[in-house]
Image (cartoon, rainbow, N blue to C red):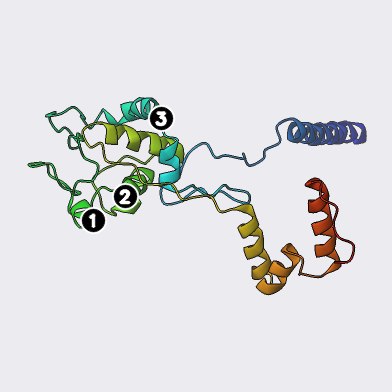
Amino acid sequence: MDDRFNTIAGWALAGGIAALSLSIVSGMVFHSERPEKMGYAIEGVEETGGEGAAAVLPIATRLASADVAKGADVFKQCTACHTINQGGASGIGPNLYASVGKAHGHVPGFAYSDALKAVPGTWTFDALDSWLASPRKYAPGTKMTFAGIANPQDRANVIAYLNSQGSNLPLPTAPAAEPAADAEAQANVAEGADPAEISNQATPGQGTPAQSKQNAIQAEEKGVTPNATH
């Protein structure tokens, strides 16, 4: 009886050890980690750029390098709902010919949503950029189900293409880049430096050794021997 009990106990212990070993090995092989990018989007939850996310350039800057041909290619995803040829019929969405600069509900006879009609202003370049980024944010309650175009340059390309189809408005002027010296001076002022000190550091004062040395170097470059008495 004891031998039989010991045999059963031994088999049970061996089975337990085998199960534990299998669990450990499975955990090593089939370990699970949260993926860097989730495979699906949850409505109402936005993806953040996190640290190092690049700031979106102004639409005027992006339009300066926009590619109309690439915009026409991106616009293909819009053709399921929109036409863009002159005199084209509206479908699920309105005809978009010559739409840049027009009022939000400018196509006669099209049933725009009250949400979009309530948004003030016109289809400016900035308005189109915001609309294409997220129609639901631009006009909460809009009937348009399109999620938006995430890539900022793709949006600029589409806007340039839309503008080329009957609108042909002058593109906005891109903001000028700030000179590096001015940017450095502003950074110093922001850190608490005296603007007068920054100016004095940039240009040696008259009669100082630094000014005399600078004058001597300039005179030598011009082939003139400076008067030692001055």
Read off the residue under disc 1: 121
Q: Residue at x 30, y 41 (%)?
A: 170
**Among numbered discs 3 and 2, the one appearing first in the sequence:** 3
Residue 184 percent across, percent down from the top left: 66, 59
In the picture of the structure, the residue carrying the numbered disc 3 is 67
Identify which amino acid the numbered label 3 is placed on.
Asp
Which residue is at 39% across, 34% downward?
157
Give the structural element (helix, strand or loop) at label 3: loop
Question: Between residues 178 and 228, which one lies in front from this camera angle?
Answer: 228
Q: CA distance from mark 3 to mark 1?
A: 26 Å
Which badge, 3 or 1, is on the more N-terminal residue?
A: 3
Q: Which residue occupies the extreme left position in the image?
A: 109
- Measured Cα–Cα span from mark 2 to mark 1: 8 Å
Callout 2 secondary element = helix
Instruction: Name the residue type under label 2.
Output: Ala
Q: Position of residue 47 (x, y in %)?
A: 51, 48
Circles 2 and 1: CB atoms closer than 8 Å: yes
Residue 80, disc: none
Quadrant including the N terminus: top right
Query: Is 171 on the left or on the right of 40, as rendered?
Result: left
- For the question of whether residue 192 can be seen, the reply is no
* Depth order, front residue of 98/115: 98
Quickly name the residue at label 2: 127
